[in-house]
Amino acid sequence: MRVIAWLVEGTWPACVDAVRAHAPDDAEVVLLHVSGPDVPAVAHGAFAGLLGRDHPRGHRPAEGWGRDPGDRLEALGGTSAAALLDAAAERLGRPCAREERSGRVEREVVAAAEGAGLLVLARDGDRSRLGPKSLGPAVRFAVDHAPCPVLLVWPEPAPDLTTMPPPPPHRP
């Protein structure tokens, strides 16, 4: 059985703990981190649009001029993802694979779950109350489209039942 744990900054410890508690000892565990293309793409676009594609001809660039900040953001994102995966692997305390993907986050998660026996992910919306708003758009998409069973965990203790929305009025 292959178990995919989708790790996101802020909620990953709950996913790792769920894998430790629920995945069989002989399961192949994959720790997954997906980086969206948004921030580097915005920086690339800003650099090209505001600063031009390169420095003026015949002008020696100052330090840093002519360097696309999107490249730096991509590198920092990769370093951050690697650090998160390292911390998660240490917390898991058993052999695991680490997978980094980039692209449309929700679609990459669903693609990674193909052929898996279990996808573990954490709620990422309004976690102060029970209900559908406790799922953000990417998690909702993954839950709705996962090609395998899903284990959805609370990153912290679940809210009290009194936070559940009231039922709709009864119509005779």
Image: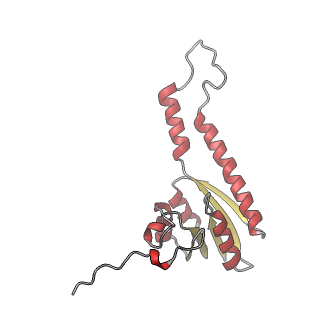
Q: Is residue 83 above or below residue 27?
A: above
Residue 22, given in percent of the width and then of the height, sits at 66, 79
Q: Is residue 54 above or below residue 124?
A: above
Q: Quadrant of the N terminus?
A: bottom right
**Residue at the spot x=51%, y=60% of the render?**
106
- The answer, for residue 110, to whether it is visible in the render is yes
Q: Is residue 62 left or right of residue 140?
A: right
Of 98 and 39, the residue lying toward us: 39
Residue pushed farthest bottom?
A: 172
Residue 164: quarter of image: bottom left
Q: How is the image coloured?
A: secondary structure
**Residue at the spot x=56%, y=42% of the render?**
40
Q: Quadrant of the C terminus?
A: bottom left
Residue 65, given in percent of the width and then of the height, sits at 61, 24
Q: Is residue 166 left or right of residue 127?
A: left
Residue pushed farthest top?
A: 58
Q: Is residue 70 above or below residue 95?
A: above
Residue 99, given in percent of the width and then of the height, sits at 67, 59
Residue 148: quarter of image: bottom right
Residue 131, given in percent of the width and then of the height, sits at 44, 72
